[in-house]
Image (cartoon, grey):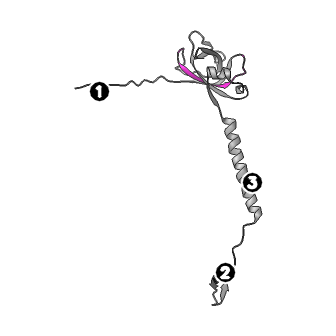
Amino acid sequence: MQPALNVSKDGQRKTAQPRKRVPLSFILAGIAILGAMIYLVYANTQSSAVYYLTVPELHHCSDCVARSVRVSGIVEKNTIKRNDQTQSVSFSITDSNQTLPVTYSGVVPDIFKPGVQVVVEGHYTGSGPFEAQTLLAKCPSKFQSATPTAK
């Protein structure tokens, strides 16, 4: 097989030169940048990851003390104590016959009351109340299945 030929402007034939190779330093720099990007995505995902637990799962979790967790439960009756001066509220949530005392400082949702399912996000030291930074009250569904009526 003959090498590819190029014709220059003056009509002389030239053989095509082989492709230039990419320097090894460019390849290594690209791999290093890609590795750094993968590490940053992984580290950011791990630091912002929040476990979603129920009250019994939180009581049995041994490594939840060091990280932020979300806990779901139902607000118990006669446990809500408000302090309007500090805008804080303390209450207990229950799930599967286990309770968890919670303290929260901030704006309380309008639908927050006993019997409402809530999700609290914060830290648990293993003893004492759960220190919530976020309090979310789940809205009960207002939709009911309707059967069509004949006219």
Could you say where residue 112 lies in the image, as x and y percent from the top left? 54, 18
Image mark for residue 148: 1
* 117 relative position to 25: left or right: left
Circle 3/circle 2 CB separation < 8 Å: no
Say which amino acid is labelled 1. Pro
- Residue identifier under label 3: 32
* 10 Å crowding of disc 1: few (<14), some (14-19), many (20+): few
- Residue identifier under label 2: 16
**Alpha carbon separation for disc pair 2 and 1:** 80 Å
Say which amino acid is labelled 3. Ala
What SS does tag 1 mark? loop
Whether 33 is drawn above or below 64: the answer is below
Image mark for residue 26: none
In percent of the image, x 72 and y 17: which residue is there? 127
**Alpha carbon separation for disc pair 3 and 2:** 34 Å
Circle 3/circle 1 CB separation < 8 Å: no
* 10 Å crowding of disc 3: few (<14), some (14-19), many (20+): few
Could you say where residue 56 lies in the image, as x and y percent from the top left? 63, 20
Q: Residue furthest right?
A: 25
Residue 14 within the segment the image draws in magenta: no
Whether 39 is drawn above or below 144: the answer is below
Quarter of image, res 5: bottom right
Highlighted magenta segment, given as a residue range:
114-127
In percent of the image, x 56 and y 22: which residue is there? 118
Could you say where residue 28 lies in the image, as x and y percent from the top left? 75, 58
Compare residues 77 and 23 and report the one nearer the observer.
Answer: 23
Q: Quadrant of the C terminus?
A: top left
Compare residues 30 and 104 and report the one nearer the observer.
Answer: 30
In percent of the image, x 67 and y 86: which residue is there? 14
What SS does tag 2 mark? loop
